[in-house]
């Protein structure tokens, strides 16, 4: 269980994270979504006690990270897979982590086997590929057999086979009853992996809900195929729908699917297809965050107007 | 205690650690040997008076002043290397208490420096005395002040390593940390030479290099603190730097 309450962080006056509140429940994979620079890593670092928040709290199992006597046994984190001593072996890297939290040294081998690195346990970490370093970072997160996992962009640098592996792996960890929070800017990947979502944009919470209810926020369109395209399009527009033509089909938004069927029957149109189209996670995300982008553009325009006004007054 | 175990496991299998000890000893032995060789070669021309004033112990232990850079850099790098690779974040994930991390690094690295210091002092004194003996300038192991000079040299080395740890925590950068250390130990004594004699008289004793000379000398040397006073002054510098480094480690996020 991760709980974030009113978390705020500013860097030199620029707000990175503002009044962020959400909680991550055990037993499911929770995706932490946001575009690059939206504050995902800052939030993760505050949960892990690496960055001191300006306001608010982040707790793991009810306690702040810095108050955990053996943090690696409570929460495993992948935050920077490059953060290793390149001249050490993979096994050595895990051994000092184990020693730091009084974890049996044998856990190092187990964790390496869990991520499929047991064959290269004695090889220098400096010679590892990015994908292997990601796996080593995940092994480091697992070393204390923690109930909570926080993985920041774990699929960066992984090949398709590795991405598939980590997806199944995270789901199996959640199925064991663990809390799994995975940050990513790759929506399509999160749609496959996560069942819950925490979405942030420009440091603020956009949504914290299930993937299904998040995508349902966007109007789903209905796809209609008929030989009488023009007639049906006109009739639907009269009925109050918004209609797009697309290669011999219509995409209809704004009225219920039943109503579309009724309109088609009224004008005697033959239907080949009448199907609801679910919005993708990506579409839902773009839709919800575009409001913020528009706000930025509007504000910039307002600033320009203000300046012009000042210039006029000066003149 | 687990944070000490953490730092030990990081340190022990490293070839770098044993290489640090070996290079400190090798450097010290080379410097002591060469200097003693030069002295022994000139022994024939020395007057009776000069022979009486000759500091056989201090010359044989000159290697300590070379080894001090090796152990100091060892101390600097134990902190800055982790900031350079970002491994410090992993360290803080395993041990969130910054002060415990710093204390564990200090303890383990000072212990390694202690081993290096004991070997350095014993080896350079043995070689130095053996070479000086060819010119009839040796005083052997039983002479007055041999014990205190050996101990003083070892303490000087361990304090320099601890100073390196403090400088590393303060600068967080290998290049600037090493530059600071080298400036304090090597460059400062050269620079103060341009000061007028009256000022040099006041500043001189406070230089770390002068403190090292005084600690390893066989008899009192001019313009410096006594061996133990000097080491106490150096310990003061080390404590101040460590306190500042600890403050920065706690206050500023990695």
Image (tube, helix red, strand yellow):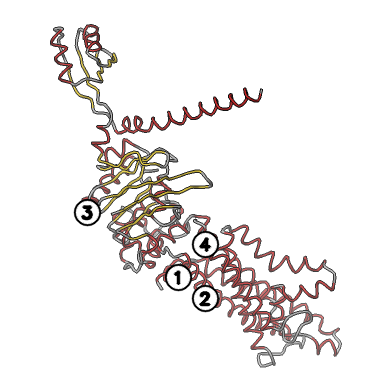
Q: Secondary structure at mark 2?
A: helix
**In front: label 1 or label 4:** 4
Q: Which residue is mark 3?
A: A177
Label 1 or label 2, whichever comes before in sequence order = 1
**In front: label 3 or label 4:** 4
Badge 4 crowding class, 10 Å Cα cut-off, few under 14, some 14 to 19, many 20 or more, is some
Do dots 1 and 4 share one subunit? yes
Considering depth in this image, is A168 or A71 the residue closer to the camera?
Answer: A71
Q: Which residue is mark 1?
A: B8
- Which chain letter matches label 3? A
Q: Residue at x 16, y 8 (%)?
A: A269
Q: Residue at x 58, y 80 (%)?
A: B118
Do dots 1 and 2 share one subunit? yes
Q: Position of residue A203 (x, y in %)?
A: 42, 42
- State yes or no: discs 1 and 2 in contact (Cβ < 8 Å): no
Determine the image quadrant of residue B49. Answer: bottom right
Label 2 or label 4, whichever comes before in sequence order = 2
- Against B74, residue B172 (above or below) is above
Do dots 3 and 4 share one subunit? no
Q: Residue at x 63, y 62 (%)?
A: B178
Q: Secondary structure at mark 3?
A: loop
Q: Secondary structure at mark 4?
A: helix
- State yes or no: discs 3 and 4 in contact (Cβ < 8 Å): no
Do dots 3 and 1 share one subunit? no
- The CA distance from mark 3 to mark 1 is 35 Å
Q: Which residue is mark 2?
A: B111
Q: Position of residue A242 (x, y in %)?
A: 28, 16
Q: Which residue is mark 4?
A: B249
Considering depth in this image, is A192 or A71 the residue closer to the camera?
Answer: A71
- The CA distance from mark 3 to mark 4 is 36 Å
- Which chain letter matches label 4? B
Label 1 or label 4, whichever comes before in sequence order = 1
């Amino acid at each position: 269980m991760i709980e974030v309450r009113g978390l705020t962080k500013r860097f030199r006056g620029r707000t990175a994270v503002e009044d962020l509140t959400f909680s991550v429940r055990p037993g499911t994979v929770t995706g932490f979504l946001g575009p690059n620079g939206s504050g995902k890593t800052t939030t993760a670092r505050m949960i892990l006690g690496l960055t001191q928040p300006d306001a608010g709290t982040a707790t793991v199992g009810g306690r702040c990270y810095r108050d955990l006597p053996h943090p690696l046994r409570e929460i495993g984190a992948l935050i920077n897979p490059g953060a290793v001593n390149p001249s050490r072996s993979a096994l050595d890297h895990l051994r000092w982590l184990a020693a730091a939290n009084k974890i049996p040294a044998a856990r190092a081998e187990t964790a390496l086997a869990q991520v499929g690195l047991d064959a290269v346990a004695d090889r220098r970490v400096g010679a590892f590929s990015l994908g292997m370093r990601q796996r080593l970072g995940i092994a480091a997160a697992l070393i204390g057999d923690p109930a909570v996992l926080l993985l920041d962009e774990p699929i960066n640098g992984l090949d398709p086979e590795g991405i598939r592996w980590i997806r199944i792996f995270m789901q199996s960890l959640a199925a064991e009853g663990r809390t799994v929070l995975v940050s990513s800017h790759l929506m399509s990947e999160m749609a496959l992996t996560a069942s819950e979502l925490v979405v942030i944009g420009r440091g603020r919470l956009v949504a914290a809900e299930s993937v299904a209810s998040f995508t349902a926020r966007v109007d789903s369109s209905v796809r209609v195929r008929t030989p009488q395209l023009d007639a049906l399009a006109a009739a639907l527009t009269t009925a109050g729908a918004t209609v797009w033509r697309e290669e011999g089909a219509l995409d209809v938004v704004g009225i219920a699917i039943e109503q579309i069927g009724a309109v088609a029957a009224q004008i005697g149109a033959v239907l080949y297809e009448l199907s609801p189209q679910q919005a993708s996670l990506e579409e839902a995300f773009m839709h919800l965050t575009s409001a913020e982008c528009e706000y930025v553009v509007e504000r910039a325009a307002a600033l320009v107007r203000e300046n012009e006004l000042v210039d006029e007054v000066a003149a | 205690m687990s944070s000490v175990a953490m730092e030990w496991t990081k340190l022990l299998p490293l070839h770098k650690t044993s290489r640090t000890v070996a290079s400190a000893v090798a450097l010290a032995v080379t410097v002591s040997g060469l200097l003693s060789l030069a002295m022994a070669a000139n022994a024939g021309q020395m007057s009776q008076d000069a022979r009486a004033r000759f500091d056989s112990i201090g010359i044989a232990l000159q290697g300590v002043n070379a080894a001090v850079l090796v152990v100091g850099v060892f101390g600097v790098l134990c902190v800055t290397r982790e900031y350079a690779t970002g491994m410090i974040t992993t360290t803080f994930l395993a041990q969130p208490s910054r002060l415990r991390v710093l204390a564990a690094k200090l303890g383990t690295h000072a212990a390694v420096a202690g081993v290096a210091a004991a070997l350095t002092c014993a080896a350079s004194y043995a070689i130095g005395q053996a070479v000086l003996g060819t010119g009839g300038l040796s005083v052997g192991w039983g002479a007055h002040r041999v014990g205190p000079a050996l101990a003083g040299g070892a303490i000087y080395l361990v304090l320099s390593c601890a100073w390196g740890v403090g400088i590393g925590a303060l600068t967080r950068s290998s290049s600037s940390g090493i530059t600071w250390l080298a400036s304090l130990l090597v460059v400062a004594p050269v620079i103060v030479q341009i000061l007028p004699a009256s000022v040099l008289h006041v500043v001189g004793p406070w230089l770390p290099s002068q403190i090292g000379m005084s600690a390893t000398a066989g008899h009192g040397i001019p313009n410096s603190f006594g061996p133990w006073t000097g080491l106490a002054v150096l310990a003061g510098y080390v404590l101040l730097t460590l306190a500042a480094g600890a403050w920065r480690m706690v206050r500023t996020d990695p």
